[in-house]
Image (cartoon, rainbow, N blue to C red):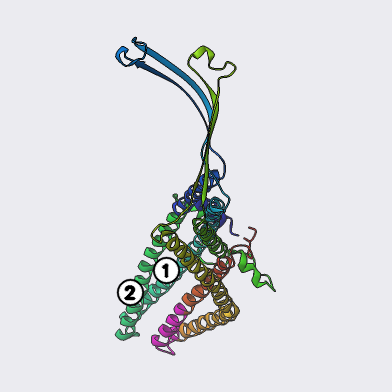
Amino acid sequence: MDERLRQLIDLALANNRDLRQTALAIDKARAQYRVQRAGLFPAINASAGTTAKRTPAELSGSGQAVTSRSHSVDLGVSGWEIDLFGRLQSLRDQALESYLASEDTLRSTRISLVAEVAAAYLTLSADSALLAISRDTLTSQQSSLTLTRKRVELGVGSELELRQIETSVETARRDVATYTAQVAVDRNALVLLAGAPLPDSLLPPAGLDSVTALRPLPAGLPSTVLQERPDVLAAERALRAANASIGAARAAFFPRISLTATAGSASTSLGGLFAAGSGAWTFIPQVSLPIFDGGANRANLQVAEADRNIALARYEQTVQSAFREVADALAQRATVDTRLDAQQKLVDATAASYRLSEARYLKGVDSYLSTLDAQRSLYAARQNLVSLKLAAASNSVTLYKVLGGGALSPASP
């Protein structure tokens, strides 16, 4: 990989705001999983208290005012649900799969970010090359315009030739302005992806000949590599989470057994709080059996089953989309070398044609019209060659993305 591109990718992975939001969402999912997991264990609480009570003389049996005090220290379990039917376990599994899906989503976001940075880098390089071509063409046509003006002044050239060249000069000047603006836009896009200002040393060179993004695609790549695509894994996790939700909804039809228990010490005097015989305990088991809930449990189960069916359809769609994206990228790759070779030969042929036409014009054999046509053809051929090189390089980036980032590793600088 181009060392500048590698540094840009590292910069984007460290500073990109979209990636940061996804990473923070993982922290939230991890915390939610811990909350659900904690429900499987009893909550143990410690408490200590003192109660003072005064009974007035007219209400006491002795006819005298009585003040009584009691002290207690307790350690106990408060409201622990005994998960005999798997409700809490299903909720924990659902939270776990959601957390794992968020991690896969982060991987997918990282791969997409790497691909976007590489694509923006290649686009900036291509547009810089197009800007250089348009400037070269403008310089060449301005030289031709100067020469033709002199020929017109000497009575050798025609006014028509002069106006035709002026038209070409203004077209090239317009293209220079257009590509200058486009290069600025491309650089702004790269800055946004990187999440930080870019030094000039990290900008790509004009042209794509020296830019290498990824290693070549290995032969005989198995289709099972798509099973490791983060979006496929995330969809699978979502399906598992939906199945776990069904388990929790089904468990709601069964009794819920909870337990509250404490053990400690109690006494009327603080000094005797931990003396022999001051032990105290409570044990409160509770069973809650749903008898009539207006159909809420059944409706919740139907919702969970519908969510599972939606997750299944989304998983199938994700797998189908993965295969199509790879097939489309490979279809483009199959002919890109042939198109590049043909376009390069077309550039060579039009360049030779332009040189011959210009020589014939300077010798007075042909009019400038044929030279102008040859120059325009060369200009268009060079532009198309840059576009094809960009398409070839972008195809490698697309394959990196659609294959889940694992089959195509970055090339060494």
Asked if the stretch drawn in magenta spans residue 365, the answer is: yes
Q: How far across and how far down the image is residue 410, in percent?
A: 62, 60
Direction top: furthest residue: 64
**Sequence-earlier tag: 1 or 2:** 1
Q: For label 1, count other residues whose C-alpha is less than 10 Å away and answer few (under 14), some (14-19) or many (20+).
A: some
Q: Which residues are magenta?
A: 361-380
With 161 as the anchor, is 209 left or right in this view? right
Q: Which of 248/4 is in front?
A: 248
Which quarter of the figure is the C terminus placed in? bottom right
Task: Return the mark for residue 311.
Answer: none
Magenta residues, dominant SS class: helix
Q: Which of 369/150 is in front?
A: 369
Asked if the residues shown at circle 1 and circle 2 are in contact, with their CB atoms under 8 angstroms apart, the answer is: no
In the rendered view, tell whether residue 105 sits above or below residue 71. Answer: below
Q: Residue at x 32, y 77 (%)?
A: 166
In the rendered view, tell whether residue 146 sits above or below residue 283. Answer: below
- Mark 1 is on which residue type? Arg
- Mark 2 is on which residue type? Glu
Q: How far across and how far down the image is residue 65, in percent?
A: 34, 11
Q: Which of 50/213 is in front?
A: 50
Q: How far across and how far down the image is residue 1, in percent?
A: 60, 60
Q: Residue at x 52, y 12 (%)?
A: 271
Image-quadrant location for residue 189? bottom left
Image-quadrant location for residue 151? bottom left
Reading the image, the residue beneath label 2 is: 170
What number of labels is visible? 2
Marks 1 and 2, how far apart in space?
Answer: 12 Å
Reading the image, the residue beneath label 1 is: 135
Secondary structure type for disc 2: helix
Asked if the stretch drawn in magenta spans residue 150, the answer is: no
